[in-house]
Amino acid sequence: MGISQSRDFLFAALFFMIAWIAIAGLSYSQNDPLYSTASNLCGSLVSVLPIVSLIGAISSGLVYAFGQFSGSEMRARAAVWAATLLAGSLVSAIAVAVAPPVLSTMLGSEVSCQGSGPSWFFDLNSLPACTPGATASAQCSCQGAGACGAGQKCCSSGACVAPTASCPSYSQCGVGQQASQTCICGTSNTCSPGQYCCSDNTCKSDCYPACSTGSVSSQQCRCNGNQVCSSGLTCCSDGTCKIFCSCPQSNTAPLAAECTCGPSASICYPSQYCCSDGTCGSSCVPDCAHSDTSPITSQCKCGGMARTSGYCCADGHYDVTGCYDQCASGFNVFDCKCGTSGPVCTSSTGRYCCYGGTCQSGACSVACTDGQQGSCKCGTGAVCTTSQYCYLAGNTCVPSCSEGSISSACKCGSGIYSSGFCCSGTHQSATCAVACSEGAIPSSGCLCNGVLKTSGYCCSGTYSATYSCCAQNQQGYCQCGQTLCNSNGYCDYVGGYNCRVAPACTNNAAVTSICKCGSTIVTSGYCCNSVPQATNCYNLCTTNLQQNCVDTAGNVCYSSVPYYYYTGTSKCVGKCPNGQITSACYCAGAIRTYGYCYNQGSTWQSSYSCATQNSYCGGTSGYTCCSGLACKSNHCCIGYGMLCSSTSQCCSGYSCRKSGGHYVCV
């Protein structure tokens, strides 16, 4: 190794030693006195550098030995590395020897170098505890706060000082807490009782600025000497921090800021009032007197809002026109408003609402209409009771007819009769019989629309001597209500009884509405070749290019279109148009998803090329004929010596014929 290289190695070793000294020194100089710092620094050098020196010497020998078994270049490099390690080992040994006298000379007193070190280097839990007030003979843990080196004195506050130095007489302050007695904040500042030890190790009357009462804070601050408010909270007058403070209740003073009002904590906004009843509003007015009959005459609050008119009802709700609903149509109704704007008739006053919108005492006696039941005056006759009906033709009140023969005026069904028979509420001229059920009439007889019948059919009150009653959607001759359906229609009950003509079903398709499949009217299933069936007309497609089957979407791949089933998409696809293929389609015997299709789907190419003889050209495809061929008016490339074996190989309008021993397109 040359002189310049040795110098570099020595400088490198010296640099790392100085860096170690600086780091170790900083770890103490921030918290301990100068003597303690020097002692701990010297102890760190004495404790660590001998180990570094030993490791460097051993590593130098191992590297040099490794180089002897390597090639010439590696051997030279190994010698340089070994010399470097050895130089560092020597510098470490020298530093251990000269550090104690150098530091003692600098401080003017002997420095203890008994293997002390910073607390981050030594595990305090593994060190023996120092005796408070005594000088340590070896490294120890001082009150669990730091490590004192040999020759240092451990104070009760946890600080390590020189043997002749005085220990601080005060305990350590709690960070952010108010001191109840004199204490040390950080390492040197002394806080008096009542002061706070802040996070920057300073003593202040308060670590936080005072909040502005009633304002939202933009930073942490102390609210009226009490709580510390976070940013975004409001400092309330009671010293608490909230999103919204409680409003001062006043019926006359508007609010200046958002706040919560009353027990319900309703949010009031600036310029509103927090009223004495605990509600927010644009103004505070007295509550209205609750009355079902007396209207509001001056401004008051009802239903949570200020009112100047209307009614504040007994149950507390507000109504513009009155607390009672309008009376229902009829006689002798009460506790309601009689007429559209009439007076209120109440049971407590014995007043009833009668026709005409008037309240009167006692039962109402107004004119009856013909057949009207109830308390009313029948023409010029008497007042009918609730069980009688008014018969205006006789100015008399009549009862309901009894079952059977009618001998005097009475009410049967919807009319009043003086003769005939009243049978189950139906008037008829014949003797009473039971009403017919829907369908065939029994031989014992029954009433079909009030007429006695002993045979035939009674269909929704219509008599049919020959045809039975239709069922819903029934086809053919049957009685559909009052109408007779024939073989071309069906009976529809919806919207009344109607005979309708069913449209023909779509062949080979699903039935979505009533239609005629062949000779049968159907409402569901499938119509397959004019034959109704429950299952699909076609089987599900399973193989590529399959036709006359159904894809997964329910579409039929008809061969007549033609469509082909493509397994790639599980759908039916059609023939490709002439030109570039942009989606799956059928061309030249296969499903294609790219390339070009021409000659009406008979030719496919993966990439564009010129049109060959007998190929499609011009037109919508824009293909040009290859060299030597011409595009004719029928969009076909024609060239000399066009050979063929069949007419299908020729362009449209040409046929394959024999000429000169060959078949050509002419």
Image (spheres, rainbow, N blue to C red):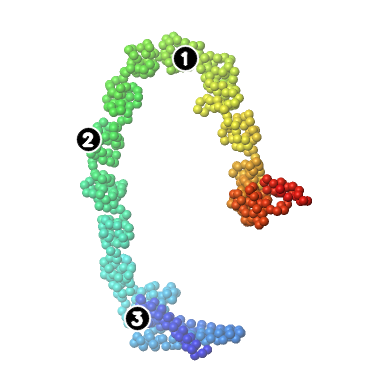
Residue located beneath label 3 in the image = 34
Measuring from the top left, give residue 276's x and y in whole percent: 24, 45
| Farthest-out residue, bottom | 3
Measuring from the top left, give residue 202's x and y in whole percent: 30, 70
- Residue located at (29% from left, 57% from top): 216
State whether residue 147 is above or below residue 347. below
Q: CA distance from mark 3 to mark 1?
A: 129 Å
CB atoms at circles 3 and 1 under 8 Å apart?
Answer: no
In the rendered structure, which disc, 2 or 3, sits on the residue that comes first in sequence?
3
State whether residue 517 is above or below residue 560. above
Amino acid of disc 2: Thr
Q: CA distance from mark 2 to mark 3?
A: 91 Å
Residue located beneath label 1 in the image = 427
Measuring from the top left, give residue 316's x and y in whole percent: 29, 37
- Residue located at (29% from left, 49% from top): 268
- Residue located at (34% from left, 79% from top): 33
Left or right, 410 with reference to 619: left
CB atoms at circles 1 and 2 under 8 Å apart?
Answer: no
- Marking on residue 534: none
Q: CA distance from mark 1 to mark 2?
A: 61 Å
Left or right, 127 with reference to 287: right
State whether residue 197 is above or below residue 430. below
SS class, disc 2: loop
In the rendered structure, which disc, 1 or 2, sits on the residue that comes first in sequence?
2
| Farthest-out residue, right | 661
Question: Badge 1 local density, few (<14 within 10 Å), some, or many (20+)?
Answer: many
Amino acid of disc 1: His
Which quadrant holds residue 76?
A: bottom right
Amino acid of disc 3: Leu
- Marking on residue 297: 2
Left or right, 461 with reference to 508: left
